[in-house]
Amino acid sequence: MGPVRVRFAPSPTGELHVGGARTALFNWLFARRFGGQFILRIEDTDQTRSREDLMTPIMDGLRWLGLQWDEGPDIGGPVGPYLQSRRLDLYRTYLRQLISAGKAYYCYCTPDELAEQRANARAAGQPYRYDRRCLYLTPEEQKHRLDEGRTPVVRLFVPDEGTVTVHDLIRGDVSFEKGLLDDFILVKSDGMPTYNFACVVDDHLMGITHVIRAEEHLSNTPKQMLLYEAFGWEMPAFAHVPMILAPDRTKLSKRHGAKGVGEYRQEGILAPALANYLALLGWSYDLSQEFFTLAQAAERFDITDVNKTAAIYNNDKLEWMNAAYIRTIPLEELAELALPFFRDAGLVPPEPSEAEMAYFRNVLGLMRERFRTLREAVETTGYFFVDEITVQPDAEARLKKDPGTPELLKQVSTLLSALPDWDSGSIEQACRGLIAQLNIKSGDLIHPLRAAVTGRTVGAGLFETMAVMGRNRTLAHIDQMLRVLAPQ
């Protein structure tokens, strides 16, 4: 084989989900590891389910993850088109070759006739296999069926004897009895190619050297190998990556926290964090390192190192990893990524000034240890951006716990209003001076003051919080709480 050429070939029938994104990632890493090409092909021949409008979210999701392709429907390439719906003439050409060589034939059986064959096989306790009643039809018999209004499919003739052995790069050799494969359909009655036929033609014409795809496609591989043999073409290498299961080892779904790539983006998962996590689902960088860039992964990745067993998805692990990225990326970058979420929440104006952006960065810098996603950042830091805050129930209970709290907050407010310097050190010194003056415990002041300033009972350091929040907004929050606590 020549230089490595791999492809990711999604069907535009739904969003780019976790499994598909990981398959694309493994293909991309393999191509980059060996200096090859990563091709994007859209398999849109399912006329009942394919939707053109779903192509864009799939491509946007791949780009967001950093998986840019070298050839594809939007950028072209030497072996396009890269949409199967625009390659129908190619499929017809190669179909005629198989029919002319006697390796494929027209089948005129109706759905009712096929259902009857299956029922008879079940009644006899036998596995169903098409009985080839159309294989030996004369031209006159074929014409008669056409005159009856029957539209044929085309089937590949599969020998009854022998085995097909898939040399899988991940799981080793897997053998299938030819007698169980049936004379499978190549082209449907509507003239559209089936997945197996179009896939083989495209992979051959596009020079694909390695087919890396989900384990669920393993049952398709012997059929595709039979097609390669029928055409006399060199086969690519095959690798079927293991499934991704839920923590309870059932089929992964949204109830386990799994989402489409676009949804992860909307929830505030960072692209490098998601790509890093996906790479670990079935592969490891090494035994000691969990965090790595795509470039670092590409230096080490080999598909033969992927595990044979199913990977287990863990949303908590993903969010933990995302939090680690949030804590370590440059603050400027974090602010740019988080800004759209705060704009959407109405906390930051559409075009923030330099001063507003500086304040925004200061808030994120103080609080980045306390949120795991960018959407959670909005919920965690919202009180920094409004004069009227929402008080959480536990904070309200803390404020109302001691009848002396209103008077204490008034004293703090008066003290803070007169501070010549507004920084965490000056604020802390003033508050601790008041604590000593009143001969109270530190918590007797700090706990109700935090509840008044933030509407919460936990957060970053109180004095640092007040310093970042600024004098005016801090005093506005305290004043709001005094109004809440005032006798009605």
Image (spheres, grey):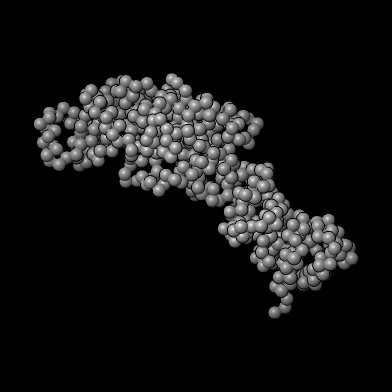
Which corner quadrant of the image does residue 78 belong to? top left
Q: Position of residue 31 (x, y in %)?
A: 50, 29
State the image coordinates of residue 77 (x, y, percent, origin top left): 42, 32
Q: Quadrant of the N terminus?
A: top left
**On screen, residue 63 above or below 429:** above
Which x, y percent locates residue 290? Answer: 63, 35
Which residue occupies 21% across, 29% down? 105
486 vs 105, left or right, is right
Quadrant of image for the C terminus: bottom right
- Residue visible at 59% across and 41% down? 273
How many numbered badges does the structure rendering display? 0
Choose between 360 and 396: the one closer to the eye. Answer: 360
In-front residue for pair 421/406 = 421
Above/below status of 284 relative to 47:
above
Q: Which residue is depicted at the point 85% across and 63% down?
A: 420
Please say whether residue 255 is visible from this viewpoint: yes
Q: Which quadrant of the structure image shows residue 478?
A: bottom right
Nearest the viewer among 121 and 305 is: 305
Residue 412: x and y in percent read 81, 67
Measuring 22% from the left and 41% from the top, which residue is drawn there? 111
Q: Is residue 397 above or below residue 322?
A: below
Q: Which residue extends farthest bottom?
A: 488
Residue 398, visible in the rendered structure: no
In the rendered structure, the answer to whether residue 430 lies left or right of residue 137 reads: right
